[in-house]
Every structure is written in C-alpha cells, then in structure tokens.
Image (tube, helix red, strand yellow):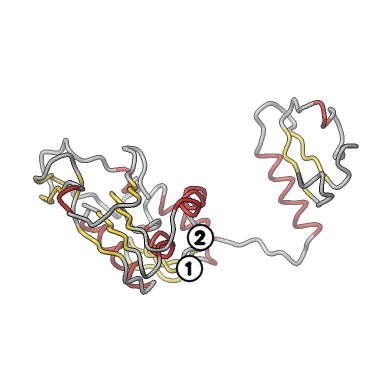
Amino acid sequence: MAGALGVPIWLALAYVPDWRWTLHGERTPWYPTMRLFRQSDFGEWAGVFERMAQTLKTEHPELRTRQAADYRLATSGFNRLARTRQGLLVYHRHDAYTGKAIDELGEVLEGELEVFRQLLRPGMTIVEVGANIGAHTVPLSRLVGAEGVVHALEPQRIVFQALCANLALNSLSNVRCQQVAAGERPGTVLVPKLNFDQPNNFAGLSLGNFQEGESVKVVTIDSMTLPKCDFLKVPTKSHRA
C-alpha cells in the first residue's frame, strides 16, 4: 500500500523473493519509492537488518542510536529502575526475558500491548493472573482509565513488591493487587524462594509441584465476586509479563 501511494518504504526480502521483486537490485519497477534489502543467503536476516540500520545512520546522521544506559536510572542490588516506553519501571536486572528486554530496549512485549489496545476500552474490568512486575499492568490500567479497574494477581512475594512499586511510581490508583495465585479451587500453594541475584526466568515459574517454599493463598476467579469481568489475561506456563 505504501508503495502504491508513492510513500518512501524499505522492504526486507527473503533470499528467494516473490517475482515482483526480481532477483537483483535495490529497486523495483512496480514501486519507484520502494527500496529493497535482500538476504545474502537462506535464513540470513541479521545482515539484512544490519544493512538497514547502517543505511539509516548514513542517510540520517541526525538520528542517534539509543544505548541501554539511556534507559537505566538507578540500580540497587538485584533491582533496577528504568525509564521505559510505558513509564518508570522497577525490574529484576538478572531476569532473562522481561528484565533483559527492559534493560536493553526500554520496552517489553509491545506487540501484545498493541493487541490489547484494539480490545480494551475505558471503564472495563480486567483480571490479570500472574501480573509479574506489572509491565502489562501499567499500560492496561491506563487503557481502562479511571472508570475501569485492573485486578492484578501475583504469587511471588519479591516480584509482587516490584509490581506494587511500579504502580506507585506511575501513580495508578485503579489497580487492586493481591499476592495470591489463581487456580481451579481455593487453597494454598508453595512458592519456592528464588535467588534474585542469579540469572533466571522469574516470570516463567510454574506452580504446583514444589515441596518447600512460602505458602501462598490460591483463589478462584469466581471467588473474587467481581461485578463484571470484561477481560481475563492468563499467562502460559512458559511466559509471563
């Protein structure tokens, strides 16, 4: 569409492209404003985006590449404070996924947030199971606005502390946090004590099979007796935000 409108556009091409792009060159007769960046071999995308980045720097010297240090504001033990796309966030600097993304990019899971933006409206009630440090909780609370509410559940005590800190840092008053786990029946579950000074995927902890740890209450969504629930966000076993 951009090419048809005559808008300048760059296109990353696979080694064997569609016939419209021919086999050589940076231009296509179909779309004069389009610039092609081709793979040099099958599956070789790294070089494509490196050439794109270098071309962008050369043709637009006013642009500055942001470094990880641009996001970091303070570090205290295993916690670090950063200025992110969604606001101020405390995160665990040894976290292999969520923490690493915030540390290096100043954002996390923006693609998922784009989906949420299309689904959520002001005034909605959201239940977020496994809220982790609140990387999603913070933007979700803004999407539902002052008339809405987010119920954020997080069973890990240390992670829960970071969640509460992030809500306070961003002055969000429409989020209700509980240090609980969610399950199919009420009860308790043992949450292991993880070493936050060592690298780990703290958001990927699956509960239910541990013989020791901190006892945490398990609630059902029904037992929360909510007036309504417009959106339920539940993590997979391998990933939480």
Q: Quarter-wise, where is residue 15 in the image?
A: top right
- Circle 2 residues within 10 Å: few <14, some 14–19, many ≥20: many
Identified by mark 1, the residue type is Arg
Circle number at residue 199 = none
Describe residue 4's horizontal placement relative to residue 173 as left or right. Answer: right
Q: Report the residue at 49% width, 48% height from top.
A: 115
Q: Identify the residue position indicated by label 1 in the image.
A: 83
Q: Report the residue at 75% width, 57% height from top.
A: 57
Query: Could you tell me residue 63's position as x and y percent?
Result: 72, 64
Query: Could you tell me residue 169's position as x and y percent?
Result: 36, 72
Q: Identify the residue position indicated by label 2 in the image.
A: 106
Earlier sequence position, callout 1 versus callout 2: 1
Q: Are marks 1 and 2 in contact (CB under 8 Å)?
A: yes
Q: Quarter-wise, where is residue 206 in the image?
A: top left
Q: Secondary structure at mark 2?
A: loop
In this rendering, the answer to whether 140 lies above or below 147 is above
